[in-house]
Image (cartoon, rainbow, N blue to C red):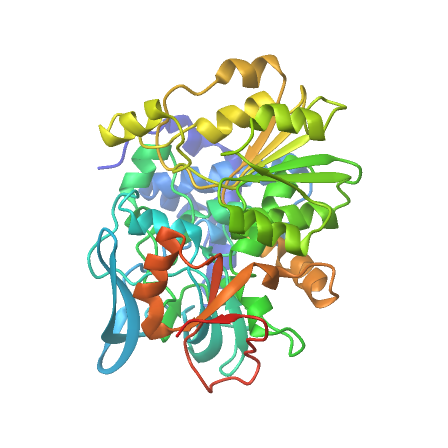
Amino acid sequence: MHPTVDPSIWDSGFVRVICCCLHTHVNATQNYHHKNHETYYWTRNNPLQALQYHQIGRSIWNTKKASMATLADSLKAASIPVATTKPRWSATATMKANVFIDTREVRVMTVPRPLITDPEDAILRVCASTICGSDLHLYHGEVPEVKNGDILGHEFLGIVDEVGPAVQHIRKGMRVVCSFVIACGRCPYCLRKEFSACPHANDSTTELKAYGHRTAGFFGYSHMTGGYPGGQSEYVRVPFADTNLLQLPDDISDEKALLLSDITPTAFYANEVAGVSSGDTVAVWGAGPVGILAAQWAFVRGAKRVAIIDGVTYRLRLAKQHMPNIHTINFKEVDVLDELNTVFPDGPGPDCGLECVGFEGVKSFTHKTERALGMEVDSPEVLNEMFKAVRPFGRLGIVGVYVDHANHVHVGAFMEKGLSIGSGQCPVQRYWKEMLRRVQNGEFDPTVVYTHKGFIDDFPRLYEMSDKKQDGLVKVFVNVAPGLTDRIRFEGLKVEE
């Protein structure tokens, strides 16, 4: 039974034109000929689809930029199915994979290999992977709908092993990096380059209820983001391969290319949504891998002065080692607001604040207690500090992960100071080519965050080290397939025995 829809829509000539365009476009390759009255009856029998086509078509029409071909392509996009989130598995071939078992427990296990499941899939033989700070949210049990047996990992690159029959541009044997964001490439969001909002790779009803919309699927993360098996494994299935894989040139190393999957784009996006430009002053909260790269992007974009804030000495030391002009602030040793007012006297305070910490950034007894009692999921402490620190009419970029509600958010400071805010998961595909160019020509070097190397069997120990901040670990390069490529180099990296 369809929900009630205003019946006057069926009398709209515009709807019939749109639906006629749809049928003409879709059926032209099948040599079918539909008359207008057939299309009219189709709209009556498919009210929800017709309404969706009407809304999309009206939006395009209002831009006054659409040709009939563009309109037809957009209408076709409205009928894209959601990617199959659970892949088919081989009955005979196996692989190693890092699997979530329980809170603070992961295990490398032998599991079946994934198979082509949808026509636009590719199967990737993974060469390199890593651990992201947001993987630790799963490890801590802080993110809902993570299940025993889930394969982790959303940062990986490799060699294409197989492609589905509908894949057009990606070919077997290509060396590629995969976006952590899974997008279809053809829906209205993707056509606007808002790839991280694509609803065609995530069928989660939980996210829909929690946020009001579904957003893009992620690899190796919560079932709120699709529950796709991740890339801390020897093989991985990639839906919508033409959109979510980037072919790599021979002159870029695996170490550099790997970080184009997530943290290089995420750090770039923090600067982008905060509008960092030449002459700006910038403060970065968090000196983890994303924060260090966000600071580097700020310098690349022409920032006049950059400060970075953290409570872990070796992270601040690494930032200073690779960016001698950066000002480091240890929040355990000084008052952050006083220090920022001294470093940026013209505000006082920075023009831009970049949040690269996320919801587990807890310092006060109040928020520690509320989280322990289940009264709060996300801590707003870093956000509140930013609201106070950034100068009036300053700009904020929030890319640290937040998943639920937070108590005691200082909305008053945000509003009264006239702050602007940008946030979200990076639409990776939108910026891939620009970032690749800057990495290739040496303007930006993501490898400065690597401190360790490892192999696939090391994942459980590396998760523990990352969690406990042991041995100065900031970012690890995990060689998943030794000997598969000669581009993997470890010069300058610490070897863990």
Which residue shows up at 71% across the image and 63% down it? Answer: 437
Number of marks present in the image shown: 0
Kindly give the residue lying farthest to the right in the view shown.
279
Q: Nearer the viewer, residue 468 or 270?
A: 468
Q: Position of residue 49 (x, y in %)?
A: 38, 43
> Does the rendering let one see residue 426?
no
Residue 229: image quadrant is bottom left
Q: Nearer the viewer, residue 301 or 366?
A: 366
x and y percentages locating residue 430 in the rendered image? 61, 53
Where residue 57 sits, quadrant-wise, is top right
User: Residue 96: x percent and y percent?
Assistant: 29, 76
Residue 120 vertical placement versus 213 (above, below): below
The residue lying at 62 percent from left, 38 percent from top is 273
Q: Is residue 254 left or right of residue 48?
A: right
Name the residue at 60% across, 45% down: 269
Residue at 57% x, 21% y is 388
In this orientation, does residue 434 appear?
A: yes
- Where residue 496 appears, as percent x and y from the top left, is 42, 71
For residue 412, above or below residue 261: above
- The answer to whether residue 350 is above or below residue 254 is above
Q: Is residue 456 left or right of residue 255?
A: left
Split into 4 quadrants, where in the image is the C terminus? bottom left
- Image quarter hosting the N terminus: top left
